[in-house]
Image (cartoon, grey):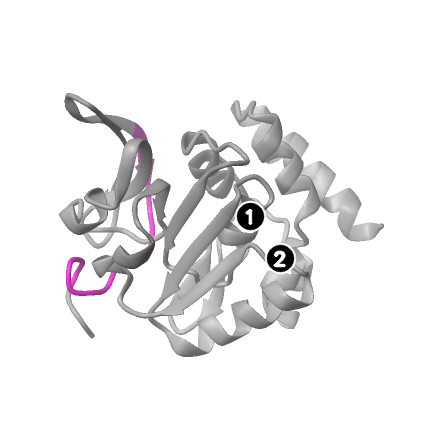
Amino acid sequence: MKYKRQREEMVKRQIEARGITDENVLTAMRKVPRHLFVSEALIDQAYGDFPLPIGEQQTISQPYIVAEMTQALQLSDQDRVLEIGTGSGYQAAIIAQIAFRVYTIERIHSLLVKARSLFDKLQYHNIVTRYSDGTTGWKEESPFDAIIITAGAPRIPETLVSHLAMGGRMVIPVGDQYSQELIKLYREKHGIHKTNLGGCRFVKLVGEHGWGEI
């Protein structure tokens, strides 16, 4: 009950108050136990209005950013979604409450193992995981109705754009290593339409079509 109240407060003060209106997103944010996606030492901060470290120099995003990116994807219960950067697994868990299936790729094995274990524990059976360089995409399962990239890219990877179905949406932070702009792409018959959703800050998107291997 304690965490349920904290989730309600998080949604009310951090998410609804900033203009997130998609009921599916709000419901998902109220439902997914965010405190299970952080380390035990940080559980008391799990519902705070800020990102948190999850190890391996990675973070779990601020709740509002998770909600904003999810809303921007305009998801339906028939959508197949590709996520680049599983991280803690929280973003995938939110999307899985709305979409038909989530395909999520993580390049750091230890993070993927933890996330997969948590997905299984919570019975999120519509999440498919892969250990790989996410910037190269998942061609065998493409095209996708939506693609979300949860790390900052120096440019939009054309490989991932090619994975979008007609009418598909992509949300990706693009910029330098210190700050980015959140860009939404929409694939239509006349090409790709881009919208700037505003400033943000993410860890680097590392990979062949990102900042390079480290």
Tags 1 and 2 touching, CB below 8 Å: yes
User: Foreground residue, 87 or 2?
Assistant: 87
Residue 203, relative to residue 175: is it above or below?
Answer: below
Image location of residue 65, percent across then percent down: 46, 41
| Picture quadrant where residue 57 is located | bottom left
Q: Is residue 209 magenta?
A: yes
Residue 39, relative to residue 186: is it above or below?
Answer: below
Q: Which secondary structure class fits the magenta region best? A: loop
Q: Is residue 26 left or right of residue 107?
A: right
Q: Is residue 192 left or right of residue 121?
A: left
Residue at horizontal 33%, vertical 51%? 202
| Picture quadrant where residue 185 is located | top left
Amino acid type for the residue under numbered disc 2: Tyr
Q: Which mark is residue 96?
A: 1
User: Foreground residue, 43 or 205?
Assistant: 205
Residue at horizontal 51%, vertical 37%? 67
Q: Is residue 3 left or right of residue 167?
A: right
Q: Is residue 62 visible?
A: no
Residue 197, relative to residue 125: is it above or below?
Answer: above
Q: Which mark is residue 124?
A: 2
Residue at horizontal 15%, vertical 64%? 208
Q: Secondary structure at mark 1?
A: helix
Q: Tag 1: Cα neighbours inside 10 Å, few (<14), some, or many (≥20)?
A: many
- Please report the bounds of the magenta region as a residue range: 197-211
Amino acid type for the residue under numbered disc 1: Ala
Residue at horizontal 52%, vertical 57%? 127
Q: CA distance from mark 1 to mark 2?
A: 7 Å
